[in-house]
Amino acid sequence: MKTLRITVLNLVIFILFAFDRLIKFYLLKNPEVIRDFKIFTLQFWQNERMAFSLDLFGSDSQKIISAITGVVILFLVYITIKEYQNKKVSAAIFLTIIILGALSNLIDRLAYGGVIDYINFNFWPVFNIADILIVVGAAGYCLKQFDIKKRTSN
């Protein structure tokens, strides 16, 4: 039963990754499309900088951010394998969420020269599903680590 649950969770994560890629592909082909959903707007936005459109590396931003992201993804894959080997499945799931979010944004940087963002709430920087995956995965992993440390210290 546990194996089925892990498989389903990984499948859901992959579906979210694929959905993010499909929306990006659609908006790249139709950048003029704007869909207003009352709460937010779906529109094409190319972010050539970092999170929140920060520009820390100047003209070499894409190369530096892509290289750092690639190294971080490889490191996270290594940690994920270790977590699975140590039977820390929920930690591995959270890391998988981060990896697929980061991978989607890395694909954008390498293929299009910047991350394709599309969710606009008008009061927050424009973002995408991959960004949500990264934030949710990182928050979940951190909370899991705090929970593990709390249990072992008692």
Image (tube, rainbow, N blue to C red):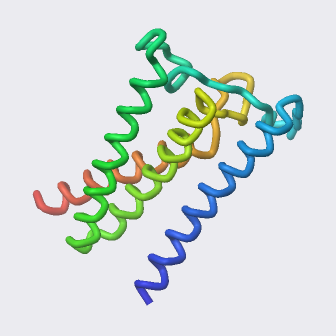
Q: Residue at x 51, y 71 (%)?
A: 9
Q: Is residue 127 left or right of residue 93?
A: right
Q: Residue 127 in the image: state x and y as whole percent.
A: 63, 33
Name of the residue lying farthest toward the top: 58
Quarter holding the C terminus is bottom left
Instruction: Name the residue furthest front.
Output: 111
- Is 109 situated above or below 76? above
Name of the residue lying farthest toward the bottom? 1
- Given residues 26 and 53, the one toward you in this image is 26
Give the x, y percent position of residue 122. Answer: 74, 23
Check the image and report above or below for 101 versus 147: above
Q: Residue at x 72, y 35 (%)?
A: 118
Residue at 47% of width from left, 44% of height from top?
102
Q: Which residue of the protein is positioned furthest toward the left in this rendering?
A: 153
Q: Is residue 71 left or right of residue 1?
A: left
* Image quarter in which the N terminus is found: bottom left
Q: Looking at the picture, does residue 3 appear above or below residue 152?
A: below
Viewer-side residue, 144 vs 115:
115
Classify residue 124 by image quadrant: top right
Which residue corresponds to the image point at 23% horizontal and 72% vertical from the top-left?
85
Give coordinates of residue 73: x percent, y percent. 37, 46
The total of numbered circles placed on residues is 0
Residue 43 percent across, percent down from the top left:
80, 32
Q: Say which quarter of the image contains residue 29.
A: top right
Res. 68 image quadrant: top left
